[in-house]
């Protein structure tokens, strides 16, 4: 195996030790009292993660959760794994250091739309660009919950909050488009209340080697209650949720009113599935960056057609593999690092 640069990879794909010992959700549950507001979507995500982690067969001591600042960033306290509650927006940076120096660890980042996309935006995009081998769970509730209800980088235009009493005039980020623009190798979206869909996405993210970015729509019942209700209510969700699977036609909605996604110039359009030939209906391809990006733009902030599932899943050399390769090449013939040679570099010379 080699990197994109043709260099041999030092450390393969199976560096995290696994175990055959039976593990349960209880094993991954800490003794800390969970302290979120009643009805917070974080509870549902935590329950899904606790149920999901034992299925990986990775020991608790080889699992690390790193968070920044925000309601979601309490996550490490509630899991019986290693964890770090770090500083605002910098969780990807700390997690990068862990992933590079400890290839035996399964490294996860838990963050929110404020933490990751405001002060932490620069750290997020460069982690994705570098393709560091870690998993990023971004809880998007479109509000600053911990600091009591200011608008966030994903709040809709016109959103009335404590910091925007006349309505937000900022154009919001689309986190999926942002991640795809940074050329993340794995990008997905799930809904906190959809346990099956969320678990499937988490499993695929865990199996991916490289940066895996998962946006999770999550309700804040105190400061942004009902923000995703149209994606949950039986009378509206079927016509709005567009689940995608690699290799399958993009068709959604109840059987008596099926909708389909077709190509429309450089963009995509939703049509009545009965009005177009089957061959015109798009088949999802997670290796197609252009298609993935077009799907991310299928819906605006009104959630008219909201794609869930895996947008992109492709392979590229990971940053940490490339670092280990360079470290190996920096060693001299005796197998120890030649520090003086590194200090001298290429721009030194001897004056006679």
Image: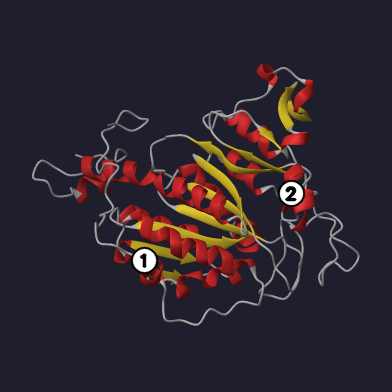
Q: Position of residue 251 (x, y in %)?
A: 67, 32
Q: Disc 1 designates what residue? A: 24
Q: Quadrant of residue 273?
A: top right
Q: Is residue 171 visible?
A: no
Q: Is residue 106 visible?
A: yes
Tell me, for residue 261, which label it has, or none: none
| Residue 168 drawn above or below residue 307 | below
Residue found farthest to the left: 334
Q: Position of residue 235 (x, y in %)?
A: 79, 51
| Residue 306 drawn above or below residue 105 | above
Q: Is the C-beta separation of discs 2 and 1 under 8 Å?
A: no
- Give neighbour class at mark 1: few <14, some 14-19, many 20+ (Cα, 10 Å): some
Tell me, for residue 237, which label it has, or none: 2
On the rendered image, what quadrant is the C terminus found in? top left
| Residue 72 drawn above or below residue 204 | below
Q: CA distance from mark 2 to mark 1?
A: 32 Å
Would residue 345 appear left or right of 270 to someone viewing this image? Answer: left
Q: Position of residue 67 (x, y in %)?
A: 50, 66
Which of the pair 254/180 is nearer the observer?
A: 254
């Amino acid at each position: 195996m080699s990197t994109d640069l043709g260099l041999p990879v030092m450390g393969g794909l199976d560096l995290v030790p696994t175990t055959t010992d039976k593990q349960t959700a209880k094993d991954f549950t800490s003794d800390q009292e969970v302290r979120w507001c009643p009805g917070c979507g974080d509870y549902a995500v935590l329950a899904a993660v606790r149920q999901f982690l034992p299925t990986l067969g990775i020991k608790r001591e080889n699992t690390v959760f790193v968070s920044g600042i925000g309601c979601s960033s309490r996550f490490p306290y509630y899991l019986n794994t290693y964890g770090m509650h770090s500083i605002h927006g910098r969780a990807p940076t700390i997690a990068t250091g862990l992933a590079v120096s400890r290839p035996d660890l399964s490294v996860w980042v838990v963050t929110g739309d404020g933490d990751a996309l405001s002060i932490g935006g620069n750290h997020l995009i460069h982690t994705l660009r570098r393709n560091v081998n870690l998993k990023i769970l971004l809880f998007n509730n479109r509000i600053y919950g911990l600091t009591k209800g200011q608008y966030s980088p994903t709040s809709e235009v016109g959103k009335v909050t404590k910091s925007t009493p006349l309505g937000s005039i900022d154009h919001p980020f689309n986190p999926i488009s942002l991640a795809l623009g940074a050329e993340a190798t794995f990008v997905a979206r799930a809904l906190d209340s959809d346990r099956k869909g969320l678990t499937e996405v988490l499993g695929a993210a865990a199996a991916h080697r490289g940066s895996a970015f998962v946006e999770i729509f999550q309700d804040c019942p105190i400061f942004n209650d009902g923000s995703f209700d149209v994606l949950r209510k039986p009378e509206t969700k079927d016509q709005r949720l567009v689940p995608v699977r690699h290799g399958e036609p993009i068709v959604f909605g109840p059987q008596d009113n099926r909708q389909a996604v077709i190509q429309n110039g450089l963009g995509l359009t939703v049509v009545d599935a009965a009005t177009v030939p089957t061959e015109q209906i798009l088949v999802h391809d997670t290796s197609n960056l252009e298609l993935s990006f077009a799907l991310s733009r299928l819906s605006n902030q009104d959630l008219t057609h909201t794609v869930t599932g895996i947008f992109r899943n492709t392979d590229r050399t990971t940053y940490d593999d490339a670092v280990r390769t360079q470290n190996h090449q920096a060693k001299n013939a005796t197998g120890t690092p030649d520090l003086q040679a590194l200090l001298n570099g290429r721009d030194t010379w001897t004056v006679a």
